[in-house]
Image (cartoon, coloured by chain):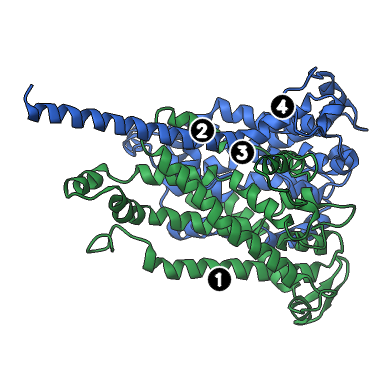
Amino acid sequence: MGYVLISPWVVGFLMFTLGPVLASFGLSFFESDMFSYEFVGLKNYGTLFSFDETRSLFWKSLYNTTYYVFLSLPLVIGTGFLIALLLNQNVTGRSLYRVMYYLPSVIPTIASSIVWLYIFQPESGLINWFLSLVGIEGPQWLSDPKTAKLVFVIMSAWGAGGNMLVFLSGLQSIPTELYEAATIDGAGRWRRFRHITLPMISPTLFFVLVTQIIWSFQIFTNVYVMTERGTSVGWPANSTLMYVLYLYQVAFRQYRMGYASALAWVLFIIILLLTVLIFKSSSAWVYYETEVGGARS
Amino acid sequence: MSAALKALVVSRQSKRWEERLQAIVIHTLLLVGVAIVMIPLAWMLSTSLKPPEQVNQFPPVWIPDPPMWENYVRAVTIFPIPLLIFVRNSLLMGLANVVGAIISNTVVAFSFARLRFPGNKIIFLVMLSTMMLPQQVTMIPLFILFIKLDWINSYKPLIIPSFFGSAYYIFLMRQFYTTIPRELDDAARIDGCGILGLFFRILLPMAKPAIGIMAIFEFTSSWNWFLGPLIYLSKLETLPLAVALSYLRPQYRNMWPELMVVSFIAMLPPLILFFIAQKSYIQGIVITGVKG
């Protein structure tokens, strides 16, 4: 009976997940426009890793994406953690704050992208007006290859509310006795933070880090909406061509399905490797309560 | 008053002052954050009501004078196809996906939570691991599959998969079922309930709050969904609102008040749902740990 009831998921998994995952691996060894299939061996991967930018924008898009991920990651996680720490201090109106901070996460990306596009207008935009108030001449933002990626880094911090919620629930699950005991032992604010809060929150941080990396490597919608010019995306000069944007372009504008499948698999492996790396490193910095000897210093 | 008592009172007072100061600092920081979060939205509302000459004015005008309410009428009728068509498309897609999600996930999660069968735990873990899978890996074969099935340019690829359940909601529902005491199961069995009776008469009615959260999540994510409709639909009049706006945006470049109006309309349904159900909404996110 158990099998019967989970069968919808099993069928869906085979049809919409496992099947396609294997198919895309197979397809990555073919050249295909969906109507003809020609086996080409490793050729797609050869093209992919080529440094010649007329053949492959893989390295370019990987660089752009990595740039975005490594700048936005500390910003998003740091902001989320900081707000959670503040909200954890028994502030009045906590649930109202929580709602306000989470708000950007429920807004459709298309809508927030249009609003941000307006805010980042070089001449009349709000950001450059704020900058001019403190005497800084604002950059050209999305029109300048040097600053275009930063727009998305800044936008990502706006959505830090999701991480904040996860951190806050992690902070609230830390037993207050720990803090009381430490206070009696004469530990100050900083030592309590360093030796209780940090170790106890590290599993949450670990979880947030993994999900955030997986998500931010797949950045697509806001970049697509904000950098589309005619039929090309990733404007200006491919400086905002993110990995999935490149993949989308190859698959659904050029219909090179084999090559696009190779791109998808390489992305999958990159994300997998990063996840494994975090898992491996976790024994050094994530504190598990079952450990003997308590928090390490 | 003795000196010792005096010292005690003074130290208590200074402690109270310290607490008060701390509260002030915390609230100030939090309010600055709230302002940063809210400014883009306030700016959107303000611009949506501006007369043309105030749109690009520098320094910016915050309160439109006079407020142009007719911007709203113009924005929804200016497009070659009335905006309402796209809203309707999004609504229908959202409702269909909600129905699919409720039918499939309540049942599958029940099986994982309550029934014993060999491999239960392992299959559950496999299911959880699919949440980590980047969807790009399945995107291309799925597209080819849907072409073969002649589903392209219809809502079938956007709706039918939700009837097969999704790992995220199955996890959410299972977590909820496990909070329902098992004694209820035993009592129901003694009263002669079979497995299906247990599901339909006991667990399903009790799971209404979780089903509500799932319905809201699914509607919102369907309403906000971009990549799927972008790939599978191409006729303008069949598009859901999110993708339709991305098609229309380049044509209405620099018509900022109109663009702000349509952005506002696009965010209204998710915002309304969020405000109505904020408490359970936030609980749902905390349970699954994944955010929007």
Specify few, some or many for label 1: CA neighbours under 10 Å numbering under 14, 14-19, or 20 or more.
few
- Label 1 sits on a secondary structure element that is helix
Compared with A107, B144 (above or below) is: below
Per the image, label 4 sits on a secondary structure element best described as loop
Specify the amino acid type for callout 3.
Pro
User: What is the secondary structure assignment of the residue under circle 2?
Assistant: helix
Asked whether disc 1 touches disc 2, contact meaning CB atoms under 8 Å apart, the reply is no
Subunit bearing disc 1: A
Q: Mark 3 highlights which residue?
A: A104
Residue B31's label in the rendered image is 2
Kindly indicate whether the residue at mark 3 contacts the one at mark 4 (C-beta within 8 angstroms): no
Instruction: Compare residues A73 and B212 and report the one nearer the observer.
Output: A73
| Residue B62: image tag | 4
Which of the two discs, 4 and 3, sits closer to the camera? 4
Residue in the foreground of this view, choosing between A5 and B207: B207
Foreground mark, 1 or 3, reads 3
- The amino acid at mark 1 is Leu
Query: Of discs 1 and 2, which sits in the foreground?
Result: 2
Please identify which colour was used for chain B in the image. Answer: blue
Asked if one can make out residue A4 in the rendered structure from this viewpoint, the answer is: no
Q: Can you give x and y, in whole percent of width and height, for residue B111 in the image?
A: 47, 47
